[in-house]
Amino acid sequence: MAPKSENPEAIVLNYMNEQNRPLNSQNVADSLQKFNLKKAAIQKALDALADNGKISFKEYGKQKVYLARQDQFDIPNSEELTRMKQENEKLQEQLGEQKKVISEVEGEIKTLQANLTLEQIRDKEAKLRKEVAEMEDRVEQLRGGVTLVKPEDRKAVEQMVSEKISQWRKRRRMFKDLWDAITENSPKDVKEFKVCLYLDVPSYVLLWSGCESSVVLLQEELGIEYDEDVGVSLQSFSDLRSNKRSRLF
């Protein structure tokens, strides 16, 4: 600790002894800025301490390097150095163990922080209980034969589905008649014409490959798309209607 006295020499001497390493005046001035000492005052204090033999110095060209006097420090012998080294190794081991314990504790803290608090658990429990009660009420309504869909609404939906399926069947039949008329006198297989419909290439390539230009024009004008291309089946929807109708009676 620096002395309470504002004497620059006392402050600089205390700092030199604490650091116990080679320093120039700029190093000392940078470190003692908190004492509001200017570099000139620092340089004057260093020279005075050196002249009085309280610190030592060496000159390197125009620069002076100052060092605390080593004879004021207790220099350990080889045995003491060995003992200090062993103590340091033990302390390092203890430090490693403490770091490991700290890491484990921090991991447990993170785990606990990731869990819900008691208040959050209670809120979640209340929410789940409410959802369960609502589901139980709905189950009781279903078991009691309560009608969840009005008969008129069901009839309207069934009628709409029936109309859509009828339109589907009608349009499918119209396309089949048209397609049969186009391919009636063609030597090619019908599957080859279907492949031609999906080719996105110039017309001269289609003619060269054997596809009829009328088929290509048909695809461009009507935008033909097959049921299987969109993953639907008229028969499956018709069967669904039949099954629902049989369950009603």
Image (cartoon, rainbow, N blue to C red):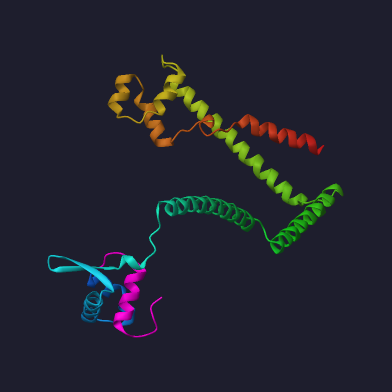
Q: Quadrant of residue 165?
A: top right
> Does residue 222 show up magenta in the picture?
no
Q: Is residue 146 visible?
A: no
Residue 7 in the magenta stretch? The answer is yes
142 left or right of 85 in image: right
* Residue situated in front as seen by the camera: 223 or 16: 16
**From this viewpoint, which residue is outermost toward the right?**
144
Camera-side residue: 140 or 94?
A: 94
In the picture, the quarter occupied by the C terminus is top right
Number of labels in the image equals 0
Residue 77, visible in the rendered structure: yes
Query: Going 70% across and 48% down the picture, which residue do you hit?
Result: 156
- Image coordinates for residue 9, horizontal then vertical, percent: 29, 80
Q: Residue at x 32, y 24 (%)?
A: 206
Question: What span is in magenta?
Answer: 1-23
Q: Position of residue 200 (x, y in %)?
A: 35, 31
The quarter of the rendered structure image containing the N terminus is bottom left
Residue extending farthest to the top is 187
110 in relation to 39, above or below: above
The percent position of residue 46, horizontal first and vertical second, equals: 24, 76
**In the rendered view, does 224 fall on the left or right side of 37?**
right
